[in-house]
Each structure stands twice: as C-alpha cells, then as structure tokens.
Image: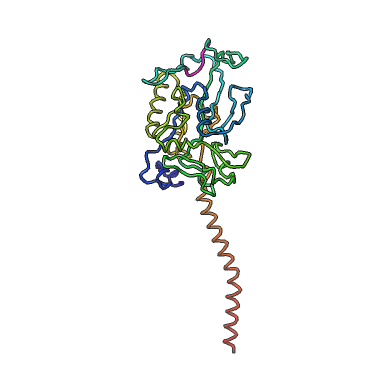
Amino acid sequence: MTGHLLSGVEPDPVGDAGHPGAPPRTGFFTDTSVCIGCKACEVACKEWNALPEDGLTLSGMSYDNTQGLGASTWRHVAFIEQSVPPGRDPAADQAPPAPEGRTELPLADTPGTGGAPPGGDPAGPGGELRWLMASDVCKHCTHAACLDVCPTGSLFRTEFGTVVVQEDICNGCGYCVPACPYGVIEQRPADGRAFKCTMCYDRLGAGQEPACAKACPTESIQYGPLDELRERAALRVGQLHAAGVTDARLYGHEPTDGVGGDGAFFLLLDEPEVYGLPPDPVVTTRDLPAMWKHAGTAALSLAGGIALAFAGPALKHLGITTVRKGRR
C-alpha cells in the first residue's frame, strides 16, 4: 500500500485483493450540479438494504433530516444554503446545455424561483441565495484503512473493487470507525456492529446497478467502470467551466492522492469543506509499515542490550575460571 502511495503509481486494489480476471473496477460519480435534493437515493438505499429508520427530525438549519452518514444511513443528501456574493452573475449558476439524454437543471436558485428556506428571506447578505445539494456515500477508498485495521476479516475487497462489511463476522470492536478518514463507518448502538454502504454488492453480482443510481431521476449519481466515469467527469467539469461555473471541481478522482483515489468521487461547486468533506484525506494507516519497522529496530536493539547485559558477567566468569585453571 505505502509503496503505491510513495511511487505515484496507480494501484490495483482488485488484483492486490486476490481477484484474478476480475471485471474492470466500478464505482460512483456523483455530479452535484444536477442534484435536486429529492432524496430518492436515500429511500432506495433503505428499501433495498432493509435499513432501519434512524430519525426524521429536522435540524432547524435546512431540509436535511438525516444530517450525515451512519450505520443506518448509507446515502445522505446534504442541503447547503449559501448567500451568493454581491456582484456575482446569476447566470453563472445555471447549468449549461446538457448532453443528449441528460436532464437540464439549474445549478442553483435564482430570484423568483422560490428558493428561500422555510420562513426565510431569499435575499441573504449578498442579495441572493443558492442551495448546494449533494448525495454523500462511502468512498470505497483504493487504500482503505478500515480494511487494514479489521481483526476479523469482516471488511473485504470485492471483485468490483468495492469495500464491504460482512455483518455476521463483525465483532463490534470498532477499530474501523476512527480509521476511516471520511468518518463514514458507524456502529449501531444495539449490538455495536459496524455498517456502511456496500454499493449494493448483491445487485452488482446479478449484473444490476446500485439501487441509489437506479432511482436517481437526474442522473446525478452515475455508476459504471471507474475509468469511464473519470473521463465523463472531466468532460463535465470542462463544460461547466466553459459556461462560467469556474468553481466546479472534482473531488476524490485522483488515483495518486492520499487514499489512492476514491471508488466514489464527486463534482463539487465549492470547496470540499463546504460539503463536510476533508480537503486532503490521507489513509490513516499510511505510516503503519514505517512504525512497525521502527518498532522492530527498537525491539532488536533492546534484545541486543539485554543479551550483552547477561553475557558480560558470564564471559567474565569464564575468564576467571580459565585463569584459575591455569594457576593450578
């Protein structure tokens, strides 16, 4: 793992996991510029995976009633309300003509479109308001720290390159929770076992796409071979930039980043922190090989010191005995 990160070579997680002849690695590309916040992905995920209800209380800050990913929320649609800076051209927040077969939708609300929050004023400090909506999910990292720390093998890499938790093997140790650089995995209070998105592994095995991507009405969530999704995402960013949406950027697509690239990456319209994402995630077990190496060196040094401590008196005693024999 560390060798790939240091060398800059794109890793092969599927091959490294022991899946010879596996199909091309697949994943998610989430284009937040066409997300309408309908939450169809959340509903489809819960229905297909039989996930329990985990709260329907509004935060009071937005229409978001799930507020984050968790053991029973494997898809989370974030609602982020922003004041548009003064002087910004409202037309810059409109989606350019979409490719054939794609839905044309605005990137944000403009005056007169009814984009105000409940009881709020559509005119913020900048005079206008826009909503950024994004469906978050487990990133299915190339270098997944949760895999590294799992003591039971409950977490494993599939032939599609995704990371799955086997709930019947999880012992509830919780090591994977702090290991995840994105804070995705969570334990259920009832029994302590960890849960997260499986990218509908059972559906993939049957040749179907994940439930969330199937249910998305605007194709904000796209599923397919990861290389194809990266090419499609790069074209989409170029299209947005040409239309004046210069803040559009990709997140998690780079195979040589701190986690070796994500199996679920995003097109964002603002900084990652705005969406609750770490700006520069790094696999938390990156330094483990070096740490074990240093620990081994220290252990050998300590063992050598102890051996010398015991060997010194013994050698001295042998020397005295030899001299005494000579005198005799």
Q: Residue furthest bottom?
A: 328
Residue 311, by quadrant, is: bottom right
Looking at the rendered image, the quarter that the C terminus falls into is bottom right
The part of the chain drawn in magenta is 106-111
Instruction: Give the image location of residue 254, x and y in percent.
Output: 43, 35
Residue drawn at x 40%, y 41% is 10
Q: Residue 161, relative to residue 250: is it above or below? A: below
Q: How many marks?
A: 0
Residue 162, by quadrant, is: top left
Residue closer to the observer: 190 or 275: 190
Q: Residue furthest top?
A: 112
Residue closer to the observer: 132 or 135: 135
The secondary structure that most of the magenta stretch takes on is: loop
Is residue 110 located in the magenta-colored stretch of the structure? yes
Residue closer to the observer: 38 or 86: 38
Q: Is residue 328 left or right of residue 260?
A: right
Instruction: Give the image location of residue 144, x and y in percent.
Output: 49, 42
Instruction: Give the image location of residue 49, x and y in percent.
Output: 51, 34
Residue drawn at x 59%, y 76% is 316
The colour scheme applied to this rendered structure is: rainbow
Instruction: Give the image location of residue 80, x and y in percent.
Output: 56, 23
Residue drawn at x 48%, y 44% is 156
Is residue 227 located in the magenta-colored stretch of the structure? no
